[in-house]
Each structure stands twice: as C-alpha cells, then as structure tokens.
Image: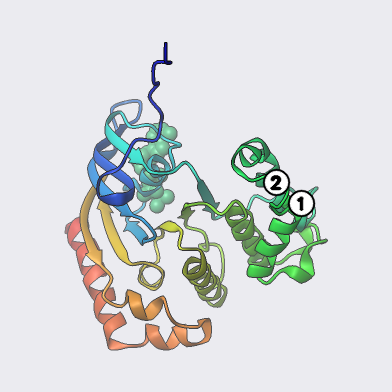
Amino acid sequence: MSPVPTPTTIAPTPHQSAVSIRSGTVEFAGGHRAVASVDVDVRRAERLAIVGQSGCGKTTLLRVIAGLQGLTSGDCHRSTDSTSFVFQQPALLPWRRVLDNVTLPLELHARRRLAHRDSGASPSPRQLALAALAEVELSNAIDRFPHQLSGGMKMRVSIARALVTRPDLLLLDEPFAALDDLLRTQLGSLVTQLWRVHQFTMVLVTHNIAEAIALSDRICIMHAGRIEAVFDNPIASVTSDVASDSESDVRRTAAFGEFYGVITDRLRAAAGP
Ligand SMILES: Nc1ncnc2c1ncn2[C@@H]1O[C@H](COP(=O)(O)OP(=O)(O)OP(=O)(O)O)[C@@H](O)[C@H]1O
C-alpha cells in the first residue's frame, strides 16, 4: 500500500508569487489587530518596500512573510522556505571571527545542504563564506572579530551571512536605520548590486521614503494594520541600475522627487488630520 500523502507547509502559490497572503490577520493578546485582513502578493524576484507609521504593523507583516509569525485568520502561502533576515542590529557572535560568523548558517543548515547537493563537487562552507564576503568587499577582514569592525562593516558581515545560503527570499527590517546617510546609501547600493546578481525576492521595511524608492520595485503603504495602497515604483529601472556614486544624482531628479511626494502625501492622508 502506498503511503498517505501528508500536507506540507509549502503550498503552491497563485500567479507564481514568492509569498501570497489572503485576508491575513494577526491579533495579539487583548484583541489588538497588528495586521488586519491584508491581501498581498510578493512576486518572485521583486523588491517590495513596506512603509508606514511606527506601530502600523510592518514588522509583524514581515514576520508573517518570513513564517515566523502565524496568522490568527486568513492564509499565507510561501513558495520557498529558503529565507534570510537582516535586522537593524547585525547580531554577530562576538567570539567568532568574521569568516566563522558567515559560515554559521551553513553549519546550522548542514544536514539540509547535504541532503540536497550532489556529493563531492559542492563548495565547502569556508569557500561559500569567502565568496559571500568577497561580494560585500570584506575579503581583507575575514580574520577580525566583530569588535574590530566599524558599524558599516558589521552590517556587511550581516548581509554576507544572510546571503551565504543563497536564499530565495531576503527580508530586511530597518537594516540601515542606525547608520549615517552616506553609509546607508552605500549599503543600499550594495544590496541592489547583490539583488541584480542573485535575483532573490526582497522585502524591505523602512521608515525612510527615499530608501524605499531607491531599493524597491513596488512600495506598500501600511496604516493601522491595513495595506492602504501599493504603488509601482516608476523609477525602479533607473535606481536598480546605478552605481552608488551616482545614486545621489538620481535622488535629485524630478522623477524621484515627484514619486517621493506621491508616497509622503499618501502616508499623510492615511494618518489623517
Ligand atoms: N508580540 C506582540 N504582542 C503584542 N503586541 C504586539 C506584539 N508585536 C507587536 N505588537 C503590537 O502590534 C503593533 C504593530 O507592531 P509592529 O512592530 O508590527 O509595528 P511596526 O510598524 O513595525 O512599528 P515600528 O515602525 O515602530 O517598528 C504595535 O501596536 C505593537 O505594539
């Protein structure tokens, strides 16, 4: 007799979405609805930015997308379980050198990797980590400990650690909020460069509208747990194709300013008088 099929956590998704949420609601103790009947699709290989006032539910929605937060009601389908997170705090292990911080997820996923890869020819965790660190331009710092790094370097390690497993889905929660403007722009350009190469699906939560415009294909505006509006980013093709040194020029263009106005007006309207 053949075995009875068991349900998996990964269901087929409509429209080839990486993540699809229908009527998604998250209610915390006391009845507070952090996410209220949300419908959203995150398309494969797109960059979706989520903006909105503090407390409107952005992080909770991101955690739902990641599979870290269950829904009280509604459905969430994810086409992959290969997900990495980048937080505002790089959260590096202080007793591990840079290289060993980046090999860590591979060590944790070793069993799964062994099950999926061909024997013999696959690169070692050290080789994968070295490649990831080269991509974030930290090849010369692999033997340092976290306390020997600047804030920007720590964030680069955090990005390398997130991407070393080659995730399908990269989730970023205010990743650069603690950094100065110049560093923030440089790291944003680095993420764009990595996205161009690896074509992961990306969801970015940020309070910074300019950053949302510079790093997204679509912008989702949240208010009080709801999605108020989703805008296609009219200058995504420009921002996704510029080197970091010319990004400040793009930010000064009329098209950038115009879209910035559209998003801020909509945020103001959502917040009310
Ligand atoms: N585990 C929890 N238990 C109870 N309430 C929570 C929990 N997590 C979040 N909340 C509440 O849900 C609401 C949405 O929180 P969330 O962190 O998603 O908002 P946010 O938009 O990301 O805010 P911020 O921009 O300040 O980070 C807030 O009112 C918050 O206090």
**Marks 2/1: CA–CA distance:** 6 Å
Question: Could you tell me which secondary element the residue under label 1 belongs to?
Answer: helix
Question: Could you tell me which secondary element the residue under label 2 belongs to?
Answer: helix
Ligand 1 falls in quadrant: top left
**Is residue 89 in view from this perspective?**
no
Q: Amino acid at mark 1?
A: Asp
Q: Quick check: 63 left or right of 158?
A: left
> Residue 20: horizontal and vertical position, in percent?
29, 44
Which residue appears at 39% of the width and 73% of the height?
214
Quadrant assignment, res 149: bottom right
Quadrant assignment, res 190: bottom right
View extreme (right): residue: 143
Q: Quick check: 133 left or right of 243?
A: right
**Residue tagged 2:** 104
Q: Image quadrant for the C terminus?
A: bottom left
**Residue tagged 1:** 100
Which residue appears at 35% of the width and 59% of the height?
48
- Foreground residue, 146 or 104? 104
**Is residue 150 in view from this perspective?**
yes
Q: Amino acid at mark 2?
A: Leu
Other-residue count near label 2 (Cα within 10 Å), few / some / many at <14 / 14–19 / ≥20: some
Q: Quick check: 190 left or right of 135?
A: left
Q: Are marks 2 and 1 in contact (CB under 8 Å)?
A: yes
Quadrant assignment, res 154: bottom right
> Residue 111: horizontal and vertical position, in percent?
66, 35
> Residue 155: horizontal and vertical position, in percent?
62, 62
